[in-house]
Amino acid sequence: MKVYVNKITGIDDAFVTLFVSKRSWTRTKEENTRAVCDRVLDRDGRLRDNADQSDLEQFQKWMDILTKWSVRHITLLRFVDVSVTVDGLHRAGQDDWDSHAKRFDNRIIRNSTRINGSNFDYELSSWYEDKILPTDMAAKELGLELPNEIEHNGQTYVKAVNGYILKGLEDKPDVKRGLYMLSIPSSFVFKVNLTEWAHVYKERNQSGSANPEVKECCEAIADQLEQFHKQFNRKLWLDLRN
């Protein structure tokens, strides 16, 4: 499994909320704030290596204020979105991640198991490799040749991955996926605002009871968020009252 935090957006919007809330907003201040963010951040929301020191200091000051107050005023970080791609989490773990789809405002798209061309062989996610052995693969190891066709209840079934399918339906994606195991690797992309991410982190981090690969996914995202900005750290996610 590989996890990629693609970009963080909306930090400038979150800064502006601080001025609006305190009634210190002016249009000039907002434009200046967005200009500083443009100079300090690259297109993916990372700090630029060549950022002007005075701009960087101002940006960090705003970040400290934002993260301090967002612990109690959780709407502030709803203005900040994170885009994440996960490659190869096993399907059962993806289903666990899907349970938070409401937190993502339903912004999650996954590998389909039903469209033509999305055939899965005896693939296992990296976490399941060397932990389980599908029956077909075990039979092959033992030198057992399973027949290409069998008769069942007076009908013919054709050999497929992990079992048999009624003859004539063996190329139907909706039928084939009935034999897929939850250990198959699956990929997905999702977006989440940081307030809702804090909840997901509380539920799926290393200290919880989630599936081990789901924990790995959660902690990898947390690592990368802090690499973007030091203030976006585990203490914030655990302290935020959402």
Image (spheres, rainbow, N blue to C red):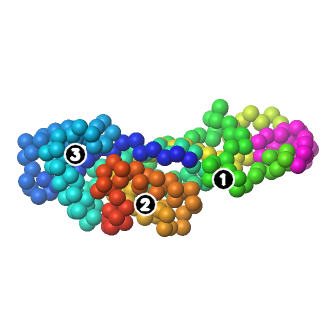
Report how far apart the C-alphas of labels 1 and 2 lie in the structure: 23 Å
Cα–Cα span, label 3 and label 1: 41 Å
Q: Nearer the viewer, residue 173 or 199?
A: 199
Considering the numbered disc 3 on the image, is that residue within a helix, a strand or a loop?
A: helix
Residue at far top of view: 117
- Residue underneath mark 3: 12
Q: Which residue shows up at 33% across the image and 48% down it?
A: 228
Residue 162, given in percent of the width and then of the height, sits at 77, 46
Give the image location of residue 73, x and y in percent: 24, 63
Q: Which residue is mark 1?
A: 128
Q: Decide if residue 27 is in sight here.
A: no
Where in the figure is residue 114, as x and y percent of width and height?
A: 64, 39
In the displayed structure image, the side of residue 123 where residue 192 appears, left or right: left
Q: Which mark is residue 201?
A: 2
Q: Is residue 83 left or right of residue 9?
A: right
Q: Residue at x 40, y 41 (%)?
A: 6
Magenta span of residues: 142-166
The relative height of residue 41 versus residue 91 in the rendered view (above or below) is above
Residue drawn 64% across the image and 35% down it: 118
Q: Residues within 10 Å of mark 1 (few under 14, many from 20)?
A: some
From the image, state whether disc 3 or disc 1 is nearer to you. 1
**Mark 3 surroundings: few (<14), some (14-19) or many (≥20) residues within 10 A:** many
Q: Quadrant of the C terminus?
A: bottom left
Q: Earlier in the sequence, mark 2 or mark 3?
A: 3
Is residue 127 in sight in this rendering? yes
Does 145 lie within the magenta span?
Answer: yes
SS for callout 2: helix
- Sequence-wise, the earlier of marks 1 and 2 is 1
Amino acid carrying label 2: it is Tyr
The type of residue carrying mark 1 is: Tyr
Q: Amino acid at mark 3?
A: Asp
